[in-house]
Every structure is written in C-alpha cells, then in structure tokens.
Image (spheres, grey):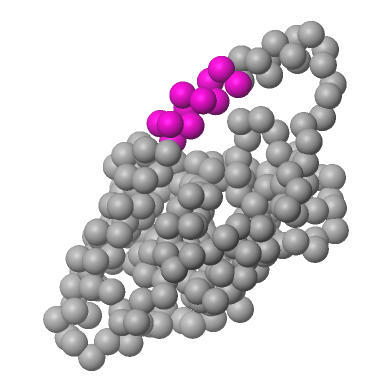
Amino acid sequence: MLPKPIDHVAPDPSVPSAAEMTTTVVIGSGLSGLAVASELSRRGVQSIVVESIECLNSGPNRTVMTDSVSLSERTELLRLLRCYASSHSLDIRQETVAEGLCMVGYSQLLPAPVLGSKKWAVQTRNGVLLADHVVLTKYPQNQLRRFVQSLGLAVGIDIKAALRAIGLYLIGVGEMLTPTTREIVRQAKVISDSIVSQGALAAQVIQPVKASVMAAAVAGSTRRPPAISV
C-alpha cells in the first residue's frame, strides 16, 4: 500500500495549526531517499525524510540484485549516506510513515491555501507535513497519472516533467531495471538542482507578496484567500 491522495478526509480544524513546515519532504528512507536528502543538505535546503508504507512492508532487503559488484557498491553508498545523515543531523524519520499525499487547496484536509504558504501536504499518523516540494522513491506510474489527472492537470508522455512543474519529483520510480548507484546519485543531483533553482525563483516573487500580506494584516484585513478549485 502506497501513500494515496487524501481527497476525502474529513476536515479537522486542529490539523493545520499543528502542521509542521519544511522545504522538502522525501518519502522513502532507502538509498534513493538518503541520496536526495544528502544532496539537498549540501545545497543548504531543509528536508524531512519519512518512510513509505511499501518500503516498510517490503523489509530492509527489498532490492534483489544478482551482480555482486553492484550490490557491494549500493551497500557502500548506503553506508556513506547514513554516515553523512548522522554527522550532519539530517531529519530522518524511519518510524514516521507517509499515509497520504495531497496538493494544498485540492483536499478537504487543507482546502484553502495561504499566500506564500506550502504547496504539498503529507499526512502521517503524527500529523501533517507541509512542504514546497515532495520527492517520491516508490510509487507506480499508473497511480501517479491518476493522481495528477485528479488535480485537473494534463499528463503527457513525460510524466516526470509534468510532476516537476508542480513540485513533485521521482527518483528510481518507474525504472525497468534497478538503477545503478551512479544513476541514483545523478538523479539526486538533478532533483536537488531543480529544487534549489525553483526556490530561488520563488523567493523573488514571494518577498513582495509577503510585504503586501503584512500590510493587509496591519490594516486589520480579515479577507480569506479563495480556495483553489479543480
């Protein structure tokens, strides 16, 4: 069972106030997830790594490889990434499982976006994580297509490009063969570069927006931002 779109969750007024905010949520604490989190850390980007239900149910040795050299490389890279995560105090939450995923404004859980706020909501048993970006390491492409279509977005041949446009990234997802360690590192760098560049562009737009929001607050404006409709 994988994180599913949470479009039909009953509204809970206590959830948004208790929600935790971060720049990026990485779903999957295996090799791919740690590679992305490490690359983001090197670029100064905050992230929270949680587990996916599929990874939890599959056990620690879910990757089957017959090539002893490749297996040795993956084992060594995983050891190095875990050491990096520990020495740099990365926020790795293996006991926290992502149970649902939605885009803010497209779910009853968080129906109305706030100017300059986070784009994605990841539901866990401990609460909601709000983020600008989400990285998935396990998710069937047919489910991803249905999810994107449920948001009213067109999905072409290049699903990864369509997802990047809305802040959703895939690493090692939909691959016919298990990606090599070199390919995992390459994908992690590409994702990190994209998130950093999007963050820089967003900062140029959000800063004047925040100023106008603060001015409205001082003036005592109580107007509620409109909800996004599909």
Residue situated furthest left in the rendering = 69
Q: Is residue 140 visible?
A: yes
| Residue 86 left/right relative to 153 | left
Query: What is the magenta range?
Result: 199-209
Q: Is residue 213 above or below residue 102?
A: above
Dominant SS of magenta comes to: helix
In the image, what residue occupies the spot 29% across and 42% down? 42
Q: Is residue 119 magenta?
A: no
Quadrant for the N terminus, please: bottom right
Q: For residue 183, what is the image quadrant?
A: bottom left
Residue at point 27%, 87% (across, down): 65
| Position of residue 117 in the picture relative to residue 38 (left or right) | right
Question: Is residue 205 inside the magenta stretch?
Answer: yes
How many numbered markers are drawn?
0
**Residue drawn at 65 percent across, 52 percent down:** 103
The residue nearer to you, when weighing 165 against 171, is 165
